Image: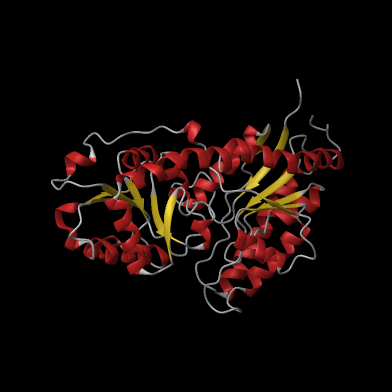
């Protein structure tokens, strides 16, 4: 039987088995599944989190020191082991969450180092995160492959890499084949007394760009009170009370479900007529991919992260970012025309299958990593996986 190659997978921001749901956790899980589907054994060698919320030199040095100690532990455990990895894969290193483990371990074990979705934050001043940014740039420069999930990240890598030979485009992806969809026991149409299309919004209730999206949605719907619609909002978080206050005007036309298991989120989406989520500052927006897979037309803003996964005029309608009147017009157009909703709905599943399916991602990962894995196994002095 052929020996399967071993990949050490690490996510410095949030490990894939973290109990708190988020887009980063979901993408990390999808990466692990795609690597497994490509024929590799994937191990989580560490759950060390390097993330710091605010720039602080003392916290940065503390995280860096703890990361060096964790890297030393792994090197000691693996140096003479016949179960050492053939490749190290770090998902989403960025200036708030640098990778203090992978470069050291990969160098010590003479195995290839790979990143996916390396990027930078634009929060704060240019100097606030410069030490973390420098660490990420050093790691990216030593990487054999840097998978790039969105155009903004590609532009960032281009700004400091000597060339782009290590950069491999990888479209954001989902795995609808493995979904369990649990429709709500009480359907949305039974929840509301008003007739009209069911709008669904799905988003964490956090400060910053998330609450900005909720605010834009509320402002837009406030101007559409003369239209027929009902709204389901899925999510919770520290800004829950503030966000509920934004939608007081909707009264019995809005239903807050709170946080739900993924299967139930999909069920509510499947039972709705359109997804409305502005997506201000959205990096990728997994909810848009899920909506398209379920044939749900989308109303969103034309931000870089959203436009990367939603085809404007084909699977959804995108308004200029943070433009409440334009977003209101987009919503009004979808609410007024069932034919338009059906047209966008029909294109969604095909778009996912052709551009954003996990099997395609597994093939892309395999093409880029297989030569490295053979080299990594050879350099480590172990049997070369076939």
In the rendering, at what x and y percent does residue 47 appear? 57, 49
Task: Give the residue displayed 62% in from the left and 41% down from the top.
Answer: 361
Q: Residue furthest top?
A: 1
Task: Give the residue displayed 71% in from the left and 47% down from the top.
Answer: 88
* Quadrant into which the C terminus falls: top right
Residue 352 in view, yes or no: yes
Q: Which quadrant would residue 59 be assigned to in this image? A: bottom right
Q: Which quadrant would residue 87 be assigned to in this image? A: top right
In the rendering, at what x and y percent does residue 343 appear? 40, 43
Q: Is residue 22 left or right of residue 383?
A: left
In the rendering, at what x and y percent does residue 128 appear? 58, 77
* Of 318 and 49, the residue lying toward us: 318
* Of 198 and 29, the residue lying toward us: 198
In the rendering, at what x and y percent does residue 38 appear? 67, 34
* Of 92 and 63, the residue lying toward us: 92
Task: Give the residue displayed 72% in from the left and 60% down from the top.
Answer: 139
- 177 shown above or below 97: above
Residue 33 in view, yes or no: no
* Quadrant into which the N terminus falls: top right
Q: Is residue 333 left or right of residue 58?
A: left
Q: Residue furthest left?
A: 193
Figure label count = 0
Q: Is residue 174 left or right of residue 131?
A: left
Task: Give the residue displayed 65% in from the left and 51% down from the top.
Answer: 90
> Looking at the image, what colour scheme do you see?
secondary structure
């Amino acid at each position: 039987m052929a020996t399967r190659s071993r990949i050490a997978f690490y996510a410095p921001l949030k490990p894939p088995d973290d109990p708190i749901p988020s887009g980063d956790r979901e993408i990390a899980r999808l990466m692990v599944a795609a690597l497994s589907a490509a024929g590799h054994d994937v191990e989580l060698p560490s759950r060390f989190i390097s993330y710091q919320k605010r720039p602080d030199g003392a916290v940065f040095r503390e995280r860096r020191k703890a990361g060096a100690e964790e890297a030393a532990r792994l090197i000691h455990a693996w140096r003479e082991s016949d179960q050492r990895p053939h490749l190290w894969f770090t998902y989403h290193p960025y200036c708030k969450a640098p990778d203090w483990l992978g470069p050291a371990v990969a160098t010590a074990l003479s195995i290839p180092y790979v990143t996916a979705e390396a990027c930078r934050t634009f929060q704060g001043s240019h100097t606030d995160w410069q030490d973390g940014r420098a660490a990420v740039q050093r790691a990216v420069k030593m990487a054999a492959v840097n998978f790039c999930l969105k155009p903004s990240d590609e532009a960032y890598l281009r700004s400091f890499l000597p060339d782009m030979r290590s950069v491999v485009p990888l479209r954001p992806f989902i795995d609808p084949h493995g979904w369990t969809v649990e429709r709500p026991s009480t359907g949305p149409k039974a929840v509301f007394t008003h007739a009209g299309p069911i709008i669904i919004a799905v988003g964490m209730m956090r400060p910053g760009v998330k609450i900005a999206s909720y605010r834009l949605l509320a402002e837009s719907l406030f101007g559409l009170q003369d239209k027929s619609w009902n709204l389901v909002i899925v999510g919770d978080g520290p800004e829950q009370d503030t966000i509920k206050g934004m939608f007081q005007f909707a009264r019995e036309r809005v239903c807050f479900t709170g946080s739900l298991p993924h299967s139930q989120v999909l069920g509510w989406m499947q039972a709705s007529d359109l997804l409305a989520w502005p997506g201000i500052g959205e990096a990728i927006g997994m909810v848009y991919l899920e909506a398209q897979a379920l044939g749900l037309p989308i109303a969103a803003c034309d931000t870089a992260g959203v436009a990367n996964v939603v085809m404007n005029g084909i699977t959804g309608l995108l308004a200029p970012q943070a433009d409440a009147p334009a977003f209101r017009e987009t919503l009004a157009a979808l609410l007024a025309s069932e034919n338009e909703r059906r047209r966008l709905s029909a294109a969604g599943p095909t778009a996912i299958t052709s551009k954003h399916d996990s099997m395609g991602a597994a093939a892309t990962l395999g093409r880029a990593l297989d030569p490295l894995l053979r080299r990594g196994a050879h350099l480590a002095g172990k049997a070369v996986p076939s």
